[in-house]
């Protein structure tokens, strides 16, 4: 595997389900990000982890719960979601999370549909 | 308020018809501008980073330029495989908030 990988690529869940999204980066980076991309809207930053520590939480509802066990893996735990949470969820990584000028490399995304 | 605006929202070109996409920003103290390409249902793919006004970078049929208020992505003699959404992003820092601010993108369609 190379770059940033995400699983699953597609997910359909009911509002009462609990599911998790997984992201893994193979670039040796120290920072990882979760973004949400809704139709016709710009990418929205959700969370930033730098050296496994959360450094940004962009006012994300508590039904989204991130976890970063190490610098290579990032999870997004989902529970009691709403239909408006349906979107493409993108993971990204960069060399140094505290430096915004570092290039972020994105995974292919997970297309989430909440019924 | 720091903002990133891209225009046009959509652009249709004939193969070989050169054009430019615009990204304007109102960030104080620009510390870089990023261009990405995104194909449908996929994650953004990094293209260029520009750090200072006057800087230019090229890759195949793409050339990115930067001024103090905007950036252009010039596409020379495009091919159908250049069809994608092109995103620009600018680092934004205010108080404790630090993030890349993305524009809404330009959806480019190149017709054969």
Image: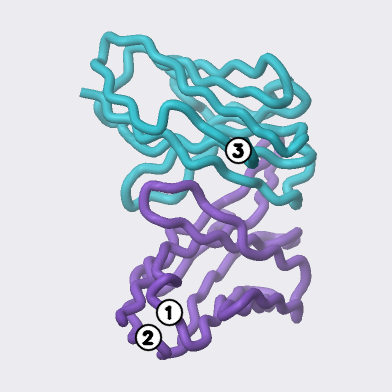
**For residue A50, side relative to residue A37 (left or right):** right
| Front residue (pair B20, A28) | A28
Q: Residue under circle 2?
A: B15
Q: Residue under circle 1?
A: B79
Protein chain holding label 1: B
Q: Residue at x 79, y 39 (%)?
A: A96
User: The chain drawn cyan is chain what?
Assistant: A
Q: Give SS at disc 3.
A: strand
Protein chain holding label 3: A
Q: CA distance from mark 1 to mark 3?
A: 28 Å
Q: Percent from the top left, x then y, of residue B85?
A: 42, 62
Q: Quadrant of the N terminus of chain A?
A: top right
Q: Residue at x 66, y 62 (%)?
A: B33
Q: Percent from the top left, x then y, of residue B90?
A: 63, 57
Are labels 3 and 2 assigned to the same chain?
no
| Lower position in the chain sequence, tag 2 or tag 1 | 2
User: The chain drawn purple is chain what?
Assistant: B
Q: In which quadrant of the rendered view does residue A92 lie?
A: top right
Protein chain holding label 2: B
Q: Residue under circle 3?
A: A4
Q: Percent from the top left, x then y, of residue B47?
A: 62, 63
Q: Percent from the top left, x then y, of residue A13?
A: 27, 19
- Relative to B11, is A39 above or below? above
């Amino acid at each position: 595997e190379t770059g940033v990988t995400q699983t699953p690529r597609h997910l359909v869940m009911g509002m009462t389900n609990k599911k998790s999204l997984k992201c893994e980066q193979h670039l040796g980076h120290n920072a990882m990000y979760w973004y949400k991309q809704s139709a016709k809207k710009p990418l929205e930053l959700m969370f930033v982890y730098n050296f496994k520590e959360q450094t940004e939480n962009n006012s994300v509802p508590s039904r989204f719960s991130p976890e970063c066990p190490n610098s290579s893996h990032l999870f997004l735990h989902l529970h009691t979601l709403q239909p408006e949470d349906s979107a493409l969820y993108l993971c990204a990584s960069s060399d140094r999370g505290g430096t915004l000028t570092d290039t972020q490399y994105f995974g292919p995304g997970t297309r989430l549909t909440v019924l | 308020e720091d903002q990133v605006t891209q225009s046009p929202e959509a652009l249709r070109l004939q193969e070989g018809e050169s054009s430019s996409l615009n990204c304007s920003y109102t960030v104080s103290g620009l510390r870089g501008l990023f261009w990405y390409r995104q194909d449908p249902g996929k994650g953004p793919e990094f293209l260029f980073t520009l750090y200072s006004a006057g800087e230019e970078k090229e890759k195949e049929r793409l050339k990115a330029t930067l001024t103090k208020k905007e950036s252009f992505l010039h596409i020379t003699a495009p091919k159908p495989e250049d069809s994608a959404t092109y995103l620009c992003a600018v680092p934004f820092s205010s108080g404790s908030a630090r993030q890349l601010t993305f524009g809404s993108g330009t959806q480019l369609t190149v017709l054969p």
